[in-house]
Amino acid sequence: MSERRVRVRFAPSPTGPLHMGGVRTALFNYLFARKHGGDFLLRIEDTDQTRYVPGAEQYIIEALRWCGLNYDEGVDIGGPCAPYRQSDRKELYHKYAMQLIDSGHAYYAFDTPEELEKKREEWQNLKLDVQQYNAVTRGELKNSLTLSAQETQQLLDSGMHYVVRFKMPEDENIVVNDIIRGEITVHSTQVDDKVLYKSDGMPTYHLANVVDDYLMNISHVIRGEEWLPSLPLHVMLYRAFDWLAVMPQFAHLPLLLKPEGKGKLSKRDGDKMGFPVFPLEWKDPFSGEVSSGYREKGYFQEAFVNLLALLGWNPGTEQEIFSMDELINAFDLDKVGKSGSKFDPEKAKWFNQQYLRMKSDEELSQMFLPIVQQRTVIASMQMVRSVVPLVKERAQFVHEMWEQTSFFFDAPAGYEEKAVKKTWKENSVAHLQFVKEMIESEPDMAAAHFEPRVKDAITENGFGMGAVLNALRLALVGELKGPHLFDIMRIIGKENTLARINKAIAYMSQMQTHTS
Ligand code: GLU
């Protein structure tokens, strides 16, 4: 038998922004498809109209684009199995629901919510622990199994609301296989008669999902662990349709856990601990609430993809930094673990830092320039290019470089109080005057001799090296921070250096008249 072509799909429901766990599911599907030279599809599962959120589909598309998870077929690009949005495929599912009724694998149920509630109370009073619609209870409920064919037809003709339910076998061990978890056996009484279709013309998730995976010839279903409980039903549906020969293989990915390690990573954890749980920023269309995104927080998409890949998948080596091509090469579902993986926000920043260091100075300068332009009018590319190499090793994000370099662009607006007290003593004015004169008489501050010449002169005059250089640093930076002082002077240039020294001298003189 020739091997089946790999076809996988990412099938999110547009019920809000895509959580980073969802992006990880998309990524694993993508890696698997690319590794095996197969197809990766994007299908939108929007059959539950009550949970539909405007803008969510567009968000999903944009998030996948940003991560570089390009799909071969999908909702906005079409393909041989179009349409890829389930609400646009609505008409198609009715036929399959009817097929199951005709073959005896499903039935009509007419019970109203009130009737069901009443029955539940009865069962409770009788201390029966069955409270579901299932093989034990369906014989007592209002459905096409208990009504005659004629009664059923009358109800259907009268326009009464109905649902189509799957008829679970009464007593059978359902054996399912999961690539990550191995063989799992569930008894049919543990699975209720799930609703597959409703008289408003919409299928439920289960029916639409299975029918579409079949029609789209999906070979592997790779999805989150929360769908594992649905697997027995899905397998039974494949059997009922007589599609077992083309049933996909299943792989349920482990959960992403909170940083403390217990429980599923949620939006609330992110808000509480100050890290994003969404790839892109999201504004809730109903409440207007804004949730932060990795992109807007300054993460490189390569870093985000890299960190997601290692949540649940283990390459089996010490390697942590992977390009997309390397991930495709190394990825294997066999190396995806069963247990949940803890998300570590500090490690996420570390990944970004690694990618920042791998960028060339020129790339970083191009990224940093617009940030500088937003913050100051004095934003020359030449200055940006000079400062980037000085702080590159110390920043985790490009925007952090501004905090570390703002004084190159803007002269200090004031001087940090504590530093002033510590550094500017009575003779500081004289020290700064001295340095100023040296600079004025220096034709080339960038020359190699400049630094030793100034330092020698300080020593010869018996000034303390630290006293002079700290006073000077405070004059130029406004704080006692920053890279090598002579680099600062060289980069801001003679004119700016002198202007800043003059300003500091004026400030100190004023201070002295005030205190004397
Ligand atoms: N629509 C489901 C979701 O929102 C898809 C589950 C699956 O991949 O089968 O996650």
Image (cartoon, rainbow, N blue to C red):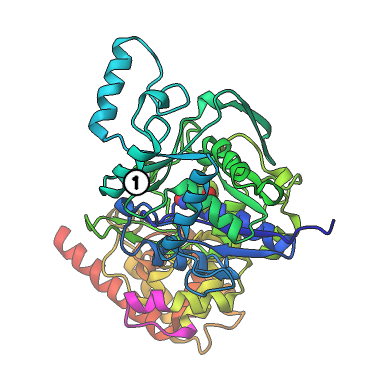
In-front residue for pair 460/323: 323
Q: Is residue 95 left or right of residue 289?
A: right
Q: For residue 293, what is the image quadrant?
A: bottom left
Disc 1 packing (10 Å; few <14; some 14–19; many ≥20): few
Number of numbered labels in the structure image: 1
Report the span colored magenta. 370-382
Residue 380: in magenta span: yes
- State the residue at coordinates (29%, 11%): 125
Left or right relative to 179: residue 225: left
| 176 up-or-down from 29: above or below | above
The kind of residue on which mark 1 rests is Asp
Percent x, y of residue 320: 68, 51
Query: Taking the image as drawn, is residue 504 in sight?
Result: yes
Quick one: 400 or 138, which is closer to the camera? 138
Q: Please say whether residue 470 is visible from this viewpoint.
A: no
**Left or right placement of residue 104 versus residue 217 in this view:** left
Q: Which residue has dot 1 on it? A: 271
Q: Main secondary structure of the magenta part?
A: helix
- The quadrant in which the C terminus is found is bottom left
What's the residue at 42%, 51% (across, down)? 203
Residue with the most extreme front position: 150
Residue at screen point 43% across, 32% down: 145
State which quadrant residue 273 falls in: top left
Say what secondary structure mark 1 lies in: helix
Position of 38 with respect to 287 (left or right) is right
Residue 60 horizontal/vertical position (percent) = 44, 62
